[in-house]
Image (spheres, rainbow, N blue to C red):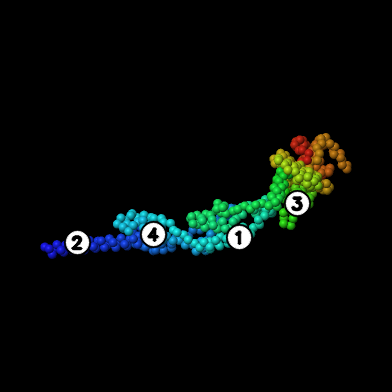
């Protein structure tokens, strides 16, 4: 009996010691490793040591891609691989393991995902060298510390005021700010928010340049507009800049504090304006009613700008400042019925002598379309081609020439003694009549149509005549 009791006691004690040993062994084991169902930053960590988990987390960690944003909004990437950037989760893992406690294996949690922060480190001197070596930082170190008027670039104003005293980048402050942002996990580093810029004190010469630039800006905004008819040309900064005298650096010249304009440059601009808009004695394409494109030469009609008057006008007006825009209609030596690049416009008479037909357009609408008879081709009294105009209007006129005196009710001369008039002696118009029985050069028109045309047409109306 005693022997059986002894065996039972030894068995119980053995089980106790084995259980206690297992408990202590597991407690010790899980004081060094993570328990069941432990996931950290996407890595399954059960049974793994801090070092093993750290190695796996470091392997899968994504290295940040910081950028420095300058005051112009340009982004400058910071390549952390060049500054020995390192990621280490050891401290966070040990703290988490310690919080869990060595007995955490007794109460395993449900499967959960833990997110731990890493401790990041880098070579601070290499990071400084990287930032200091960026193009924009190096340029900031060597840029002029003066206030200067410079030619504009890339569609900017003709001139800009470069201010080397205001908002100068301090490279040392920038480097310190970049280090601070990385330590705080900030990877969009805006230099303007980090006290990285400083202002220097202006000198008397700097203030003088500021005043000159203000004078240039005032000159550029003259509020002067050229009214060319269908088009208006605003004398904006680009045109105004072309009037200035310039030095070898392309910047305006001054006489003391007076901004100098160039009479030669003003004349060049006016002459170029004339080349664009003058049509007198030129040739142009004309779209006929029938759809053909013919070349017509301006004969008596056309536009010719008065260059001398306009040069004088501009030279005087450029000296004034205005609150309200001045809309200027230029002076002409010869002015068309319609002003603009297309001075024939959409109100004109078209005489197609090849088809012996005449049209009258008013504001783009054809109001009259009629057969006519033009100059006698056999007798070489051909009606002249060209762009002319109605230079007079008369009623009940006797047309006189060598061997004839013909009364007409309506007379509209267009070039010399050639004009448009009624011809009540004709019973037929159009066709081939003009070849052998044409006029002395005038455009014979049916009387009932001529009376209507006469009332519609104004003196000065263009007349386009072609075969």
Crowd band around label 3 with a 10 angstrom C-alpha radius: few (<14), some (14–19), many (20+)? some
Measure how far apart labels 3 and 2 are at the Cα level. 112 Å
Q: Earlier in the sequence, mark 3 or mark 2?
A: 2
User: Mark 1 highlights which residue?
Assistant: 138
Residue situated in front as seen by the camera: 292 or 204: 204
Q: Nearer the viewer, mark 2 or mark 1?
A: 2
Return the x and y of residue 82 as percentages of the image width and height: 52, 63
Label for residue 254? 3
Identify the secondary structure beneath mark 2: helix
Single out the mark in the foreground, 3 or 2.
Answer: 2
Tell me whether the residue at label 3 lies in contact with that at label 4, contact meaning CB atoms closer than 8 angstroms.
no
- Residue 261 rendering spot, x and y as whole percentages: 76, 50
Q: Residue furthest left?
A: 1
Q: Earlier in the sequence, mark 3 or mark 4?
A: 4
The answer to which of marks 1 and 4 sits earlier in the sequence is 4
- The disc at residue 94 is 4
Residue found 69% across the figure and 50% down from its top: 207
Q: Which residue is mark 2?
A: 12
Mark 1 falls on what kind of element? helix
Note whether 121 is above or below 379 in the view shown. Answer: below
Asked whether the residues under the numbered discs 1 and 4 touch, taking CB atoms below 8 Å apart as contact, a structural biologist would say no
Binning the other alpha carbons within 10 Å of mark 2 as few (below 14), some (14 to 19) or many (20 upward) gives few
Measure the alpha-carbon separation of dots 1 and 3: 34 Å
Q: Position of residue 382 (x, y in %)?
A: 81, 47
Sequence-first tag of 1 and 3: 1
How far apart are labels 2 and 4 at the CA level? 38 Å
Q: Residue at x 65, y 52 (%)?
A: 201
For the N terminus, give its image quadrant: bottom left
Precedes in sequence: disc 2 or disc 1: 2
């Amino acid at each position: 009996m005693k022997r059986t009791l002894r065996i039972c006691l030894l068995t119980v004690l053995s089980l106790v010691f084995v259980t206690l040993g297992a408990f202590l062994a597991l407690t010790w084991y899980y004081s060094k490793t993570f328990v069941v169902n432990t996931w950290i930053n996407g890595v399954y960590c059960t049974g793994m040591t801090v070092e093993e988990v750290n190695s796996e987390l470091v392997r899968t960690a994504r290295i940040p891609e910081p950028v420095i944003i300058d005051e112009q909004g340009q982004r400058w990437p910071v390549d952390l691989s060049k500054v020995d950037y390192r990621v280490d989760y050891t401290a966070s893992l040990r703290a988490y393991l310690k919080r869990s406690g060595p007995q955490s294996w007794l109460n395993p949690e449900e499967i959960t995902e833990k997110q731990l922060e890493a401790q990041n480190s880098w070579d601070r001197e290499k990071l400084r060298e990287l930032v200091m070596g960026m193009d924009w930082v190096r340029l900031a170190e060597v840029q002029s510390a003066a206030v200067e008027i410079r030619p504009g670039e890339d569609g900017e104003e003709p001139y800009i005021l470069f201010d080397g005293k205001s908002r100068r980048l301090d490279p040392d402050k920038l480097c310190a700010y970049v280090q601070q942002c990385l330590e705080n996990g900030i990877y969009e580093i805006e230099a303007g928010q980090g006290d990285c810029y400083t202002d220097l004190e202006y000198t008397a010469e700097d203030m003088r340049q500021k005043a000159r630039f203000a004078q240039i800006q005032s000159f550029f905004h003259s509020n002067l507009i050229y009214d060319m008819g269908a088009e208006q040309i605003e004398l904006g900064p680009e045109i105004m800049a072309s009037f200035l005298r310039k030095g070898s650096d392309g910047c305006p010249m001054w006489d003391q504090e007076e901004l100098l304009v160039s009479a030669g440059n003003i004349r060049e601009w006016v002459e170029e304006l004339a080349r664009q808009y003058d049509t007198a004695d030129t040739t142009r394409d004309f779209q006929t009613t029938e759809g053909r494109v013919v070349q017509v030469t301006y004969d008596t009609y056309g536009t010719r700008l008065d260059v001398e008057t306009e040069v004088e006008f501009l030279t005087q007006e450029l000296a004034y400042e205005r609150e309200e825009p001045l809309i200027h209609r230029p002076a002409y030596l010869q002015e068309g019925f319609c002003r603009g690049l297309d001075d024939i416009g959409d109100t004109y008479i078209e005489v197609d002598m090849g088809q012996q037909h005449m049209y009258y357009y008013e504001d783009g609408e054809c109001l009259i379309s009629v057969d006519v008879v033009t100059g006698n081709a056999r007798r070489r009294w051909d009606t002249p081609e060209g762009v002319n105009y109605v230079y007079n209007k008369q009623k009940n006129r006797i047309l006189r020439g060598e061997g004839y005196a013909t009364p007409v009710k309506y007379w509209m001369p267009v070039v010399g003694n050639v004009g448009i008039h009624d011809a009540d002696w004709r019973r037929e118009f159009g066709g081939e009549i003009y070849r052998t029985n044409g006029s002395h050069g005038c455009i014979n028109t049916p009387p009932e149509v001529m009376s209507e045309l006469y009332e519609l047409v104004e003196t000065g109306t263009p007349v386009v005549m072609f075969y």
